[in-house]
Amino acid sequence: MTDRPRILLIKPSSLGDIVHTLPVVAALKQQWPNGHVSWLVKRQWAPLVERMEGVDRIWAVEATFSGWLSQARVLRRYEWDLVMDLQGLFRSAAMAWLSGGRVRIGFANAREGSPLLYTQRVAVPTQDMHAVDRYLLAAAAAGAAATGRPEFRFAIRQADVDQVREILAARGISMEQPWVAMHVSARWKTKRWPLESFAAVAERVVQKGLGPIVVMGSGDERKEVEELKALTAVPLVDAAGAVPLGCLPAFLSRAAIMVTNDSGPMHIAAAVGTPVVALFGPTSSTRTGPYGEGHVALTHEVPCRPCFSRVCRHTEPLACLTHLDPERVVDQVRARIGLRNAAAHA
């Protein structure tokens, strides 16, 4: 391969998986500083990829058959030295094949027959490894083995910081004061800690003077936020639907800590170095927990977890979450804020 390779990275979704791919970009750029890295992503996630260092071009695709096909025709005009499919589904593998890439790398255990369309298949030694480490296996197979700790390089724009400052100021919060980000939703219902438990944590955190609670989420998650506000006896700062996707790295980098379900924003917080207290139910923190040091994933162990199911079949529904004591969460919030304060004054 030349010292200026043209590389196509295929990782269209979802939010957390896209964040997990950031260290791959860093590894590719470390190996080939003059290489050109393009990223094929669903249009809804493109604003986040725009904030990632090392991505030279974004191919935003509509999540329809015609949308994918139209991009395939354009992609074939380029001479790709390397195509990496980290999605591992038939559609993404087909895009890799249609791109005309000379070398097409994907995982040997990818689904829907996609390995048949790769020229190089990467073995995954165990399922119980973090997604970040698994994706880096593909980078290593391409000749770009990461050295040192995996790097999450967000290019946080000043305009994003200014917008976050305005969003918080409009709600009576200074961006410089300590505040706690809280995200109470998740794509799967089985991954959602009870709102009553989040409310109990919010009350205790405010009463202990650990900072105001800023509740975040997309516009589609307003219902859960309104229900949470109705359950709490302390005021909450409502930022649901107010923070654009592209501003999330700037927003979460300013939080003292984040309390969250297993969700996409959780991974952004971990990537920008904000301590995370995460609540895990049917999923595995070993595979998709907040990556790096300073975070904690809490759960209540039951024999069937992790089940990775969107439908709970336990005799006591969602016991892995409902039995998780809010006081455990408050203790972890207090401990991590204390560690962060100590580090800031060291």
Image (cartoon, rainbow, N blue to C red):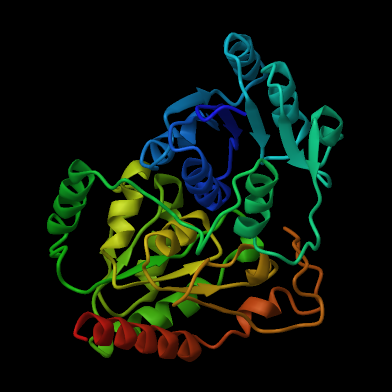
**In front here: 271 or 35?**
35
Residue at 61% from the left image edge and 51% from the top image edge: 145
Question: Is 215 placed left or right of 128 in the picture?
Answer: left
**In front here: 222 or 159?**
159
Q: Determine which quarter of the picture holds residue 269.
A: bottom left
Question: Is 208 placed left or right of 175 in the picture?
Answer: right
Report x, y in % for residue 149: 50, 64
Q: Is residue 210 visible?
A: no
Q: Determine which quarter of the picture holds residue 103.
A: top right
Residue 269 lies, with reference to residue 42, above or below; the image says: below
Report x, y in % for residue 319: 69, 80
Report x, y in % for residue 78: 57, 13
Residue at 52% from the left image edge and 48% from the top image edge: 27
Q: Quadrant of the C terminus?
A: bottom left
Question: Is 159 placed left or right of 82 in the picture?
Answer: left
Name the residue at the front extreme: 2
Q: Determine which quarter of the picture holds residue 112.
A: top right
**In front here: 120 or 162?**
120
Residue at 62% from the left image edge and 62% from the top image edge: 288
Residue at 55% from the left image edge and 74% from the top image edge: 279
**In front here: 157 or 321?**
157
Number of numbered discs overlaid on the protein picture: 0
Residue 2 lies, with reference to residue 339, above or below; the image says: above
Q: Can residue 148 be seen in this view?
A: yes
Residue 66 lies, with reference to residue 197, above or below; the image says: above
Question: Is 316 placed left or right of 300 in the picture?
Answer: right
Q: In which quarter of the image is the N terminus?
A: top right
Report x, y in % for residue 21: 55, 47
